[in-house]
Amino acid sequence: MDVLTAMKENFKDCFGDAETREYFSPGRINLIGEHTDYNGGHVFPCAISLGTYALVADRNDNKTRIFSMNLADKGVIEFPMNDLKYNPAYDWANYPSGVVDVFEKAGYKADHGFDIVMYGTLPNGAGLSSSASIEVLMAVILNDTFNFGIDMVDMVKFSQKAENQFVGVNCGIMDQFAVGMGKKDCAILLDCNTLEYRYSKLAMEGYSIVITNTNKKHTLSSSAYNQRRKQCEHALSELQAVKKDIKTLGDLTNAEFDSIADHIEDPLERLRAKHAVYENQRTLQAVDALEKNDLAKFGKLMNDSHVSLRDDYDVTGEELDTLAELAWDQEGVLGSRMTGAGFGGCTISIVKNENIEDFKKNVGEAYTKRIGYAPSFYVANIADGTHKIEG
Ligand code: GLA
């Protein structure tokens, strides 16, 4: 049974017969530029064909009732369309209700609610941005239904705001941007300082991007994430004391950073800031290499990115390190690194098409032996951003 047919059956069971509209919102991978978004640097993510589907019907009242086929045990969750507050009882539905709240506060009031069934093809808790996928999905549903005419970049900002202020996770803008602005077969070079962006065609003749999920049970990474942010902010304030014209770590070249780095008192904070600066420069070099068709150099920079995230930023952990290190040893692999926040989640590897099967077998077996459970593999399809499914 295909996804939409299964969703229609679930819809009927939950809400009865109604005319529905369909929407899709992708997840994302980030090719390079990790933990740079909230440091005013560049990121280079893309949207993928795994993501979240929604089947939506209008209601006549002010309520939304929402059901996730992935979290069926949570049942149908109900929330009003105005005066919303974070509510533990809403559980995962705090993501869509948070978006409704941000819209309302920005003057975009919904005059009725919905019945919604969602189904996600993203592996749970794998760091492929299922929450951003749901947020931008809800934004597009609202914008489409009420003809608000909001452009996608603003919907991306609203979605990030919902995550920051309603859900209370202090993320940067990369995930929502990649999900909303994704374009088939392209990555997005985004300057997180100015939000200037451009698409870069991914022409990886003979190679694919393989996503490998550590399958590490969800680790509570948000406190470590927020701590990294704080360390970078503090390091920046010490650098600003000697270099007044910088607004973010992304403003510095490696050489500029090296020349003033000893003004950061805490050695750990110095390492965190070094990663942010070097990773930003590495991202620009990597995009340049890719656009000159130098995939080997791109892969090498991916490896360097992982090492920096492991040694200087300390967000990898045994599972991600094992996957990356095993991948580096495989035939036909140009590069491999963790993607997303880290602490668990996924790696991405650039693998020659004819070596993919051996890659899965070798990495799968060795990882299982060392870690005690198996990883999962997905060949990434680079896809469009959140949209209504027409026809
Ligand atoms: C998470 C956050 C992003 C970004 C990455 C790390 O995915 O949501 O904003 O900071 O981690 O690059």
Image (spheres, grey):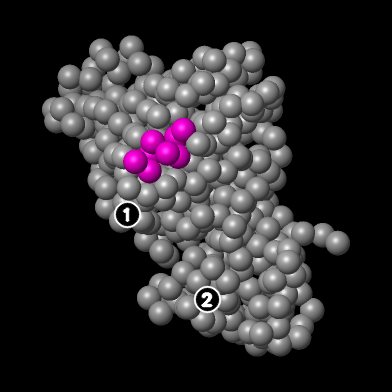
Q: Position of residue 384 (x, y in %)?
A: 69, 45
Q: Which residue lies furthest to the right in this view?
A: 391
Neighbours of disc 2 within 10 Å: few (<14), some (14-19), many (20+): few
Residue 106 visible in rendering = no
Q: Is mark 1 within 8 Å of ligand 1?
A: no
Vertical relation: 367 (above or below) 201: below
Percent from the top left, x then y, of residue 165? 41, 61
Compared with 178, 388 (above or below) is: below
Going 38% across and 43% down the picture, which residue do you hit? Answer: 368
Majority secondary structure of magenta residues = helix
Q: Which is nearer the eye, 363 or 100?
A: 363
Q: Looking at the picture, tell me which residue is in the foreground, 9 or 279.
A: 9
Which image quadrant is residue 353 in? top right
**Where residue 121 appears, x then y in whole percent?**
59, 57
As drawn, the label of residue 72 is: 2
- In this rendered view, identify the residue nearer to me: 225 or 99: 225
- Find disc 1 in the rendering and name its residue: 219
The residue lying at 65 percent from left, 62 percent from top is 53
> Considering the image in quadrants, where does the N terminus appear?
bottom right
